[in-house]
Amino acid sequence: MKIAVLTGGGDCPGLNAVLRAIVRKATINGDTVLGIRDGWMGAISGNVVELGIDQVRGILPRGGTILGSTGVSPATVAENLSTIVKVLSDNQVDVLIVIGGEGTLGGAHLLEAAGVKVVGVPKTIDNDLEGTDYTFGFDTAVNVATEAIDRLHTTAESHHRTLVVEVMGRNTGWIALHAGVAGGANGICIPEQPFDLDVVQGWVESRFAKSYAPVIVVAERAIPADPDLLEQHGTHDEFGSRYIPNIGQWMTSALEQRTGHPSRNTVLGHVQRGGTPSAFDRELATRFGLAAVDAVTNKSWGQMVALRSTQIITVPLTEAIGSLKRVPSDRYAEVALLFG
Ligand code: F6P
């Protein structure tokens, strides 16, 4: 069997661990593996390389993806469907393993509908994919953000400042929630729970009243509950949703103005998804890679490997691309008790 594999969307710690596991298990099974470079772009242009044991040696702890990646929408895959099918057939590919988030797996679903044998592997630091309890990359991002929050506490207290930390997560607040709780943040704002600026101000003031300095974690797409604020300071994203760009800086200025305490903003950005994966992510990514090859052997076309509790299972690709996994309100409420 000839298996092709691609990594699509934003890079994510653990991608190389998946590739290594796929190549090693496929080799044991007597299968061969081709790597498609730069996600769907390589599938369109025919940029394909052989992936053997030599190519994956030593990559387990390496961040990024040795194949390269691009964010290509399902619409672009749809427009280039026949080209991709031809590239796969010209390279005698029997099965395509697609490692990606919602958008990349959406493209995989389109190819499956066009008759290509496809298996999916979920990937995102945002942990916002339905169908799996966790995606690899998330734990690493949470650890990076937690370490930053730990460090910010001491400088906040030395200078009696409010420190606002903006973290990634796109339209969900999983990174903010997990890192904020792990780092003992004094307030967490996530997209799923629009914030009341008076309440955030209250967290900051109550923290200062106890002779401590506050650290507030803000997810990049957290929004105010007040529609006037959103209207006045917001803009639209490509899907028409309203948000405030640079929300961390915006909140820092608002809190400084309201409380009179000096405030500083830290935007963690891509440092959350660069560099070596955590042990948890290496292990999960390895199990996903091994299970993806099992899914090929079992002819589980149109399925995605997933973590359910401690077991690796397969679920239909459609489970991951229908809707986002958002932070439930009770998960937020249970920790919000500690804010302030
Ligand atoms: O989906 C992963 C992610 O890192 C998000 O958390 C973030 O919003 C986005 O990608 C950033 O994308 P880019 O690297 O294209 O700026």
Image (tube, grey):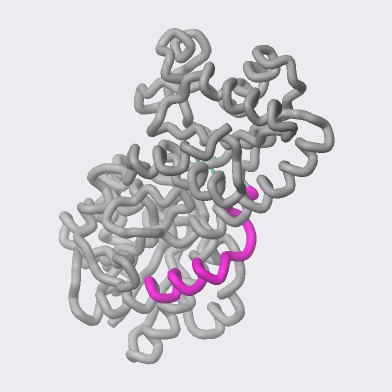
Seen at 30% across and 40% down, the residue is: 75
Seen at 49% across and 8% down, the residue is: 232
Left or right of residue 105, residue 190 in this image? right
Q: Is residue 162 magenta?
A: no
Seen at 47% across and 37% down, the residue is: 336
Is 123 rendered above or below residue 153?
A: below
Quadrant in the picture for the N terminus: bottom left
Q: Is residue 281 magenta?
A: yes
Magenta stretch secondary structure, dominant: helix
Q: Quadrant of residue 206?
A: top right
Given residues 222 and 44, the one toward you in this image is 222
Given residues 43 and 202, the one toward you in this image is 202
Q: Looking at the image, can residue 323 be seen? A: yes
Residue 188 percent across, percent down from the top left: 52, 36
Is 273 rendered above or below residue 326?
A: below
Seen at 21% across and 67% down, the residue is: 117
Residue 100 percent across, percent down from the top left: 39, 56
Residue 306 percent across, percent down from the top left: 31, 65
Quadrant in the picture for the C terminus: top right
Residue 259 percent across, percent down from the top left: 68, 16
Q: Which residues are magenta?
A: 271-288
